[in-house]
């Protein structure tokens, strides 16, 4: 069966796996204090243009989001997210489990607009009962979004300016950050992202690693005792080398960007194939996630030979589904899909 269901169905990129094998017999210190983890941190600081950045490696995306958000919020703070945001819908209530609330605002193409964020913050403080409510203590966005859309440089700067005016941090979920940065529709670099938010993470799990995410606090602004919080939230690997070696490989010779560019090139071919075959797009997306509308009987029949992701109902007889490319997608996969469609 052809598989376009997600971008983390395969193991690790061969170059990452090779480095894990090459270093396997080395005796290294634990919990991320090894030489490869330190090397990875140095390379990430250089790529981000942030020599003073605090960098931590966590096991997975959900653990990363809940640890960063709970760490940056006060005891009674809440996090603002789009109503389609990953933390609002697809993380099993992990944020609420830490004792914090997710405050949702209407999305536009998966994104929070400056107008929606301003309305949320003003509305909260205009409520005479706001002292009885969890206050909006930080803002969460993802880049790319759940719909594969991207924040422009100006959009990100506008959100960051609003956050600064209200003295709350802006946090960017970068589970698929590589595919966003490599997208033909992106006008953001890693350094520009770092300059216009207060924390973000570089996703490894979905961009060539077996597992692991790199959290970056670009101005050395990590919460106090953040390392201890990582362990408390079950996100710290005793064999920290596992993530450190992988990110050291990903940030050597631009591997992270190179494999992300491959996924975007495949996505462009995928879009051309879907258009050629007359498929209806739910929205235009410049990243590795492509959303099309299928008639339900057609969806069931296609699903017998191609794996894709159910996304949301479109109407009573149609459904939105997602096709995703990744670092592991091949030209043969795409040509087989063309023949099948």
Image: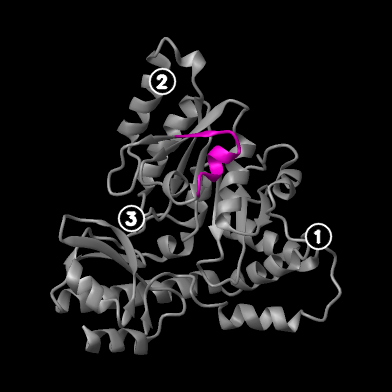
| Residue 35 horizontal side relative to residue 4, left or right | right
Q: Give the crowd class for mark 1: few <14, some 14-19, many >=20 residues within 10 Å.
A: some
Q: Which residues are magenta?
A: 92-102
**Is residue 1 or residue 51 the one in the foreground?**
1
Q: Any magenta on residue 144?
A: no
| Residue 85 horizontal side relative to residue 173, left or right | left
Label 2: element kind:
helix
Q: Earlier in the sequence, mark 3 or mark 1?
A: 1
- Residue 223: which quarter of the image? top right
Residue for badge 2: 124
- Residue 324: which quarter of the image? bottom left
Residue for badge 3: 149
Q: Is residue 184 visible?
A: no
Q: Earlier in the sequence, mark 2 or mark 1?
A: 1
- Image position, residue 320 (x, y; %): 25, 61
Q: Which residue is rendered at x = 77% and y = 80% of the image?
A: 24
Q: Give the crowd class for mark 3: few <14, some 14-19, many >=20 residues within 10 Å.
A: many
- Residue 96: which quarter of the image? top right
- Image position, residue 200 (x, y; %): 54, 49
* Spatial separation of the CA atoms under disc 3 and disc 1: 36 Å
Residue for badge 1: 33
Marking on residue 283:
none
Relative to 302, is 92 above or below?
above
- Image position, residue 181 (x, y; %): 43, 61
Q: Is residue 36 visible?
A: yes
Mark 2 vs mark 1: in front: 2
């Amino acid at each position: 069966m052809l598989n376009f269901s997600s971008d983390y169905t395969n193991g690790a990129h061969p170059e990452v796996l090779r480095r894990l094998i090459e270093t396997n017999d080395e005796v290294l210190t634990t919990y991320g204090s090894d030489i490869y983890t330190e090397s990875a941190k140095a390379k990430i600081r250089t790529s981000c243009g942030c020599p003073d950045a605090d960098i931590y490696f966590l096991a997975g995306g959900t653990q990363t989001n809940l640890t960063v958000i709970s760490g940056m919020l006060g005891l009674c703070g809440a996090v603002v997210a789009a109503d389609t945001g990953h933390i609002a819908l697809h993380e099993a209530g992990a944020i609420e489990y830490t004792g914090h609330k997710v405050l949702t605002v209407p999305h536009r193409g998966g994104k929070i607009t400056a107008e929606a964020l301003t309305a949320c913050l003003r509305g909260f403080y205009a409520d005479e009962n706001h002292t009885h409510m969890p206050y909006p203590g930080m803002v969460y966005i993802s880049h790319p979004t759940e719909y594969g859309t991207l924040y422009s440089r100006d959009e990100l700067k506008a959100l960051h300016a609003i956050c600064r005016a209200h003295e709350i941090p802006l946090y960017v979920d970068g589970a698929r950050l590589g595919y966003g940065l490599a997208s033909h529709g992106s006008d953001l670099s890693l350094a520009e992202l770092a300059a216009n938010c207060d924390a973000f993470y570089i996703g490894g799990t979905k961009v060539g690693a077996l597992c692991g995410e790199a959290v970056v606090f670009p101005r050395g602004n990590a919460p106090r005792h953040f390392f201890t919080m990582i362990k408390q939230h079950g996100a710290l690997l005793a064999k920290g080398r596992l993530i450190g070696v992988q990110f050291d490989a990903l940030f050597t010779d631009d591997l992270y960007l190179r494999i992300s560019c491959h996924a975007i090139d495949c996505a462009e071919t995928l879009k051309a194939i879907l258009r050629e075959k007359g498929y209806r797009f739910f929205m235009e997306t410049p990243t590795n996630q492509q959303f099309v509308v299928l008639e339900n009987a057609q969806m069931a029949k296609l699903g017998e030979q191609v794996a894709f992701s159910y996304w949301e109902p479109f109407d009573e007889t149609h459904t939105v589904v997602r096709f995703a490319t990744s670092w592991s997608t091949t030209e043969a996969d795409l040509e087989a899909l063309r023949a099948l469609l």
